[in-house]
């Protein structure tokens, strides 16, 4: 999905919600939990169908599929197909390796599974990231400032020569490697104070923003400095939507939660 | 595999070689390439059987299995089983995510696939790494200074408060999180000058050292400062062994290459 299409989708549907798909068997409603791996697929499909109109993107996190063994990958594949071309599909895989190896990861997620985007970890630098950017019409979403407490440990460390923290240096280097048509950044909602700095470095880039919902981030605070003239934000919520209900009405409860977030977004578009 | 067992294995077999399993269908001998995914499994088994006596560890890189789709994970599983308990099995996956998600990755590789170790990327900090360390009897191998040129981009950046580069800070923090019985570091063979610094920070820790062979690292230079009194090194070679031959004698050629490396190692033990 090209940037123009994503922007059109956002303004037409009046939402910049991304639904994170982190299906844990132990958290599924009982009737699905008893079905095992296929219950996970049914759960994903029900969540997707219930939230389609409120979202522009889905973000399956690969850890939750990988933990199911080879069958988990079949279900990942079927989940991606079920989403279809109407939404941006982000493989939240946080991959990254030396060049020839990153190319294998990119090929897997972009070609074999048909995802639009993949999250990538920056630690290994340019030649670990470039192979993802070589795929035309696909998105690389680089970790910048993540939503977890561990973001203090290295990402916020001050670099002597650059006179800025590591995460800002990651953004500043990466905008030289990829354009706003192929590169986005992960910036956690738990750091609302960071968004003005992000926009000073990466004005036109889309940001994938996890941490609203279960992790406590505040939508208004993010939008204040995070929005750009093409919206430029994809706000992700996972657990707060997936597990809004634990009974047979889980999909309706998920829809209600997604709708609530979408209604909060309308005012910013 | 506990540290004492690994050390015993190294001194008994007189080798600290790790064979990296990066099977690319396009690079397989013709008779295996034509078998598709099952050809990859046959290739892995033949390489493993040919190199067993020269190696103490195998390191399948997940990118090369993931690229094969769900079948690739079946083959990964069968490859790990084929290696068996006689060697340390390192899942080179470079995973890392927020806490509850890292736990899913750890569970997949340690429990479902029965690997002994997994490589982990440090960018997301402590709470992304700790879940791997929670698994008793298993190893977390944290990226420190990687072998690729991109290691210049962020890993070597000088931190103002710490007065050392990022990669040294990663080691210094991590030795507070995990003991030498559960934590190792990746230090690329392409940085022989770094090993004295590594040993100043992490004297007793094992190091996984990629970059000998195809990437050009020098064994003697690494051993000079990298060895400790329990050896403390696992030297990885992948492509130089896997693709030593391209014909039906590929396994013999791989054995010869592994044997050559092992003979170079004898003098250091």
Image: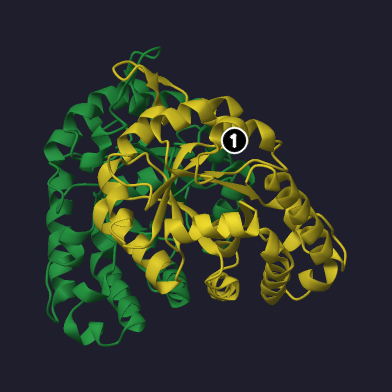
Chain colours: A yellow, B green
- Occupied quadrant, residue B40: bottom left
- How crowded pointer 1 is (Cα within 10 Å; few <14, some 14-19, many 20+) is rated as many
Vertical position of residue A2 compared to residue B144: above or below: below
Q: Is residue B159 above or below residue A249?
A: above
Chain letter for mark 1 = A
Can you tell which quarter of the image residue B34 is in?
A: bottom left
Q: Which is more toward the observer, B200 or A129? A: A129
Q: Position of residue B28 (x, y in %)?
A: 21, 76
Instruction: From this view, report whether residue B7 is shown above or below residue B194.
Output: below
Quadrant location of the N terminus of chain A in the rendered image: bottom left
Side of B67 relative to A115 (left or right): left
Residue A170 % position (x, y): 37, 34
- The structure residue drawn at horizontal position 68% and vertical position 76%, both measured from the top left corner, is A38
Q: Position of residue B12 (x, y in %)?
A: 30, 50
Q: Residue at x 27, y 23 (%)?
A: B197
Query: Relative to A242, is A172 above or below?
Result: above
- Could you say which is closer to the camera, residue A48 or residue B219? A48
Mark yes or no: residue B232 visible. no
Q: Residue at x 36, y 29 (%)?
A: A169
Q: Return the residue at label 1.
A: A148
Looking at the image, residue B90 sits to the left or right of residue A252; the answer is left
């Amino acid at each position: 999905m090209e940037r123009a299409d994503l922007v059109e989708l956002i303004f037409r549907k009046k939402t910049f919600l991304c639904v994170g798909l982190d299906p844990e068997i132990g958290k599924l409603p009982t009737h699905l939990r008893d079905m095992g791996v296929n219950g996970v697929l049914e759960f994903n499909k029900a969540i997707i169908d219930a939230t389609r109109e409120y979202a522009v993107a889905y973000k399956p996190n690969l850890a939750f599929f990988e933990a199911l063994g080879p069958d988990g990958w079949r279900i990942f594949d079927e989940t991606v197909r079920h989403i279809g071309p109407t939404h941006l599909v982000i493989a939240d895989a946080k991959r990254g390796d030396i060049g020839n190896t990153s190319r294998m990861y990119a090929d897997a997620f972009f070609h074999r599974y048909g995802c639009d985007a993949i999250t990538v970890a920056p630690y290994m630098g340019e030649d670990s990231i470039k192979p993802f950017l070589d795929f035309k019409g696909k998105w690389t979403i680089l970790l910048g400032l993540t939503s977890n407490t561990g973001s203090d440990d290295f990402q916020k460390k001050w670099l002597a020569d650059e006179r800025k923290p590591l995460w800002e240096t990651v953004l500043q280097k990466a905008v030289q490697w990829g354009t706003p048509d192929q590169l986005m950044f992960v910036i956690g909602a738990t750091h609302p104070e960071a968004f003005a700095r992000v926009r000073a470095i990466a004005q036109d880039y889309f940001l994938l923003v996890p941490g609203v919902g279960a992790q406590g981030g505040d939508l208004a605070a993010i939008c204040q400095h995070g929005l750009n003239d093409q919206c430029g934000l994809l706000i992700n919520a996972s657990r707060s939507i997936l597990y809004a209900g634990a009974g047979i009405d889980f999909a309706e409860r998920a829809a209600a939660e997604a709708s609530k977030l979408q209604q909060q977004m309308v005012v910013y578009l």
